[in-house]
Image (tube, helix red, strand yellow):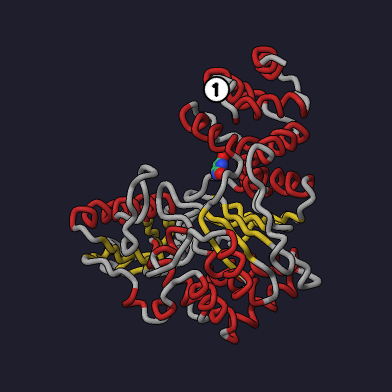
Amino acid sequence: MNMVELIQKKKEGQSLLPAEWEFFIQGVTDDSIPDYQTSAMLMAIYFQGMTRQETFSFTNAMLASGDIVDLSALPGIKVDKHSTGGVGDKTSLVVGPLAATCGITVAKMSGRGLGFTGGTVDKLESIPGFRVQLSEQEFIEAVRTSGMGIIGQTGDIAPADKKLYAIRDVTATVDNISLIAASIMSKKLASGSEAIVLDVKCGSGAFMKTEQNAGELAALMVDIGNDAGKKTIALVTDMSQPLGCAVGNSLEVIEACRTLQGRGPADLQELCLMLAGYMIFAGGASATPEEGCSMAERVLKSGAAFQTMKQFVQAQGGDVRALEDFSRLKQARFSAPCIAEQSGFVASIEADRIGLASLHLGAGRRTKDDIIDASAGLLLKKKTGDTVEKGDVLAVLYADDRDKLQQGIPEAAGAFSISSNRPEPRPLIHRVLI
Ligand code: URA
């Protein structure tokens, strides 16, 4: 096989055979294919697309390029949950305890964030003492204790994806649905769970800006998962405004704890119950997703899920007292309000601008070596549809540095649109693909 012929074939819009995709991915993994040929192939895929069968082959080849996590030492059905990412998305911290309390084993590997705010692992690290690097034996022990565990990426999962992503990033070939689906699913399929629930976000704060694109991505990922023999379900959910009210690492941990205590924002609670319900169903602990949701609601109301959260944090070395006494989390030195300049209704809160504001405040990373400030971020005091009087506080911003605070304020203020008409409410869950 020869790479020039394969690029030529794809350039002409022909489908490549599974063995041809294996050849390409193998060559990317062992560096025998130079970056210029990889770039040319990515651009040919970008313009010509891949059939469903090609996308499956491409994903499987990337999956096989590295380690596959073995969770067989853990009891029960392991269900993973993945979000395509959004602003204020702390669902894993709530959904994990809900599903685990209902009998699902949640053994997750999560990433660090690059961009707006931290990833789940960064959020957890804002709890004093919490360890995201555990040996395999420690991880298995931690999950046995509480029914759940979340650690940073270990081993060499889908190394071909790592290399391809770095090239896609600099060749303007990231935003292709087949490439995104293959990238996400190769890592999820390697993570050892038997079932996967995907939260595919759409809106200004998400990768996919429109419901149409998010729906296409969700459908493709569900097909890839099911083709690989894993029960896969996707929910397409709204990210036109931030989820919940907290954006920033320790602020999101606090909001997740409040939600598990039944005191969380309505949108976050609704989405978490729904995702947990589908995880419980996917893991076979309920006959229907609706029954799964009711089970999740019961363990939220009874406080049992919050107990699971405490056990999980303790098992991974975190200071459990910080989950109730929030003064034990790092506090920002400075804060400032963002004030409404007119009265009316909040017509929209652009999630991407809130994300950018939190990045200015120090809550995210511009490059992968940046250090996150756990205390930085913002709390929304108004959400879309709320009434506002001129002079009301729209959000409170937190930072450890006055200059950062000053940079965040105009960005956060610019995210809010105030109108004299109440906006039509947007659904939180646009569709479910099962
Ligand atoms: N997230 C991934 O892991 N891969 C992509 O291609 C896009 C988002």
Q: Quadrant of the N terminus?
A: top right
Ligand 1 sits in quadrant:
top right
Give the image location of residue 152, x and y in percent: 51, 55
**Residue located at (44% from left, 72% from top):** 318
Residue 337 figure quarter? bottom left
Residue 278 is at least partly visible in this image: yes
- Tell me where residue 319 sits by quadrant: bottom left
* Relative to 122, residue 256 above or below: below
Residue 111 locus on image (x, y percent)? 50, 52
Q: Is mark 1 within 8 Å of ligand 1?
A: no
> For numbered disc 1, what is the local secondary structure?
helix
Residue that badge 1 annotates = 39
Residue 432 seen in the figure? no
Question: What amino acid does circle 1 point to?
Answer: Ser
Residue shown at 48%/33% (left/top)? 169
Q: Is residue 6 above or below residue 425?
A: above
The mark total stands at 1
Q: Give percent across and percent down for residue 410.
A: 27, 52
Residue at left offset 69%, top offset 46%: 221
Quadrant assignment, res 253:
bottom left
